[in-house]
């Protein structure tokens, strides 16, 4: 790569990768906090049990997958109509990860 394309070849896709990471992280953490705050308010301010935090994590994962799929697809230069291709498996993975990570960390 260095011989054929120069040092710039190592930075191809970096901006899209950073966009992906930023959208995933912002959406994941932000929507989890907003969602849990709403559930706590509906629960008369009582702390949430783990299963409710897990459900908030699953919901957040679905949101995250929907927002994060276009940057993922753009890494492989897909057209606009294909940006949400494969969203089902991505959503299941994101929902599972968020359920475990966010619920247990919170």
Image: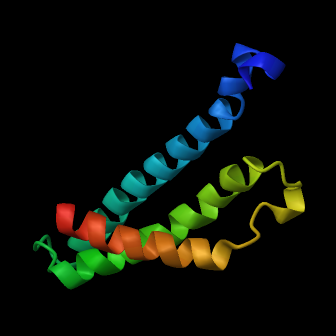
Which residue is at the far front? 3
What residue sits 70% from the left and 35% below the top?
A: 13
Query: How far across and down, in percent of the image, does residue 22 sit?
Result: 51, 41
Residue 2 visible in the current orientation: yes
Which residue is at the far left? 46
What residue sits 37% from the left and 53% below the top?
A: 29
Left or right side of 92 for 97: left
Query: How far across and down, in percent of the image, does residue 76 sit?
Result: 77, 50
Q: Is 6 situated above or below 53?
A: above
Query: How far across and down, in percent of the image, does residue 84 sit?
Result: 74, 66
Q: Quadrant of the C terminus?
A: bottom left
Query: How far across and down, in percent of the image, does residue 75 sit?
Result: 72, 47
What residue sits 43% from the left and 57% below the top?
A: 28
| Colouring | rainbow
Which residue is at the far bottom? 51
Observer-nearest residue: 71 or 3?
3
Give the quadrant of residue 66: bottom right
Q: Is 26 situated above or below 43?
A: above
Left or right side of 104 for 30: right
Q: Quadrant of the N terminus?
A: top right
Left or right side of 105 for 74: right
Q: Is 75 situated above or below 8?
A: below
Give the quadrant of residue 6: top right
Residue 42 visible in the current orientation: no
What residue sits 19% from the left and 61% below the top?
A: 105
Observer-nearest residue: 76 or 19?
76
Total marks in image: 0
């Amino acid at each position: 790569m260095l011989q054929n394309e120069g040092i710039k070849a190592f930075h191809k896709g970096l901006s899209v990768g950073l966009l992906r990471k930023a959208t995933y992280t912002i959406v994941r953490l932000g929507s989890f906090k907003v969602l849990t705050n709403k559930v706590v308010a509906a629960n008369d301010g009582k702390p949430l049990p783990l299963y409710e935090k897990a459900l908030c994590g699953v919901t957040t994962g679905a949101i995250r997958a929907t927002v994060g799929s276009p940057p993922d697809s753009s890494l492989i230069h897909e057209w606009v109509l294909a940006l949400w291709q494969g969203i089902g498996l991505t959503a299941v993975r994101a929902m599972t990860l968020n359920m475990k990570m966010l619920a247990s960390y919170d």
